[in-house]
Structures are given as C-alpha cells and as structure tokens.
Image: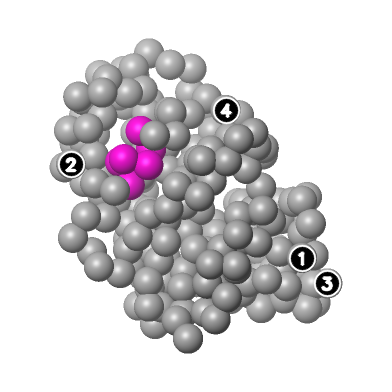
Amino acid sequence: MLSIGIYGGTFNPIHIGHLIAADEVLNLFQLDKIIFIPVGIPPHKDNNIAPAKNRYEMIKLAINGNRKFEVSDIEIKREGYTYTYDTLMELKSIYSKDKLHFIIGYDAFKESDTWKMADKVYEMVSFIVVNRGGFDIKMHEDIEYKKRKYNADVKYVKIPDIEISSTDIRLRISKGLNYRYMLPEAVFNYIIKNELYRGEKLEGI
C-alpha cells in the first residue's frame, strides 16, 4: 500500500513556496509520492486565473526531475466547476489499495464545512493542513472541532515561512517588477514565452 499526497490548488502560478511545502510534507509524513492537481474552474474562488493548460504545463516544468512528484489533469479535464468530492471519488477508484492524504492550506481548510459532501470528503482521506505562519489558538480550536465533528484524521504542520505568493508574483509581472527567483527557472521562462499575467485585474491567490 502506497501513501500518497494529493496537493490541489490553482497554482496560478506554481512557485518555490509550493514546492518547499510539498517537499516538507513528503519528508515529514514519509509519503511515497505527491500528486499536484491544478483545478479547472474552482467554485470557491474568483475565476481570474490563467488557462488550465498553462497552469498544468507550469507544474510539469516545476517538478521535472523529482521522481516523487507527479501532476494530474483529472480536474482540468472535467467540464464545469471542479469539486473536491468528485476528484477524490475518482482518485479513490484509481488508488483503491492506497492511503490518500489531502494536502491543504489552512485558509482553504477553514472553509471545508461549505464543500460539496463535506462529511464524505472527511471519510475518504486524511488531511494534512499546512500553514506558513504556524497555528494560533483559534486555528487549533477550529481543526480540533472539525476532527470531532467529522471523526476526521487531520494532522497539521507549520511549513517554512517563505514569503512568496502567487498573488504577489502576478502583481509583480503586471507592474514589470522582478520576480525571477520566486519560481523555478523553467516556469519563469514559460511565463515570459506565453506572456501570462500581463495587465490583468488581480484577485485570488
């Protein structure tokens, strides 16, 4: 039985912080691999994001050379909004003999009560909640509440405090500021070649 991390997000674009978080979780929880899953059309975010095919290709470039990192187009192939429940149901059928760990930032985790079939989601996978700044008392209480409410397997870990965000990268690009070392070189070159994130309205992460 494999222990597999499922790392979903917009990855708009993927950056060094995402990779450091994934590597930290991989090693701390001794996972066999992590699958990055870029969302297609997320129901809980403004849809001001780069085309799914571009975000998918950037992830491929970012994780190239790491045998324990993979990327899946399971969500971007699906028409309409993408829901965590539907994705996990599909993944459970593919990895029926393996243990799945859903890697999620605290900002997204705190909204998990609002998800489609939230109770079923908690039954299907264990959660690994990550947060850059650690966890304050309110966060601890929220996590413990959800663990009790859903009888859920939830672990949480403070990841290295790397002050990089996709929002900041997009802002820098739109203003012509330097962002060269905030993401892998191959991703940097891809953004330039495809002229992504230029002069757009900036919303979401």
Label 2, label 3: how far apart the Cα atoms are:
43 Å
Label 1, label 4: how far apart the Cα atoms are:
26 Å
Please report whichever mark, 2 or 3, sits nearer to the chain's N-terminal start.
Answer: 3
Q: For the point 71% across and 64% down, which residue is it?
A: 121
**Which is in the foreground here, disc 2 or disc 3?**
2
Residue 100 visible in the displayed image: yes
Label 3, label 4: how far apart the Cα atoms are:
31 Å
* Secondary structure found at label 3: helix
Percent coordinates x, y for residue 183 in the rendering: 25, 44
Q: For the point 26% across and 55% down, which residue is it?
A: 63
Mark 2 surroundings: few (<14), some (14-19) or many (≥20) residues within 10 A: some
Mark 1 lies on residue:
120
Mark 4 surroundings: few (<14), some (14-19) or many (≥20) residues within 10 A: some
Q: Which residues are magenta?
A: 54-59
Inspect the image, locate mark 2, and give the three-letter code of the amino acid beneath it.
Ala
Label 1, label 2: how far apart the Cα atoms are:
38 Å
Mark 1 surroundings: few (<14), some (14-19) or many (≥20) residues within 10 A: few
Q: Residue 201: say if magenta.
A: no
Inspect the image, locate mark 1, and give the three-letter code of the amino acid beneath it.
Lys
Inspect the image, locate mark 3, and give the three-letter code of the amino acid beneath it.
Lys
Label 4, label 2: how far apart the Cα atoms are:
25 Å
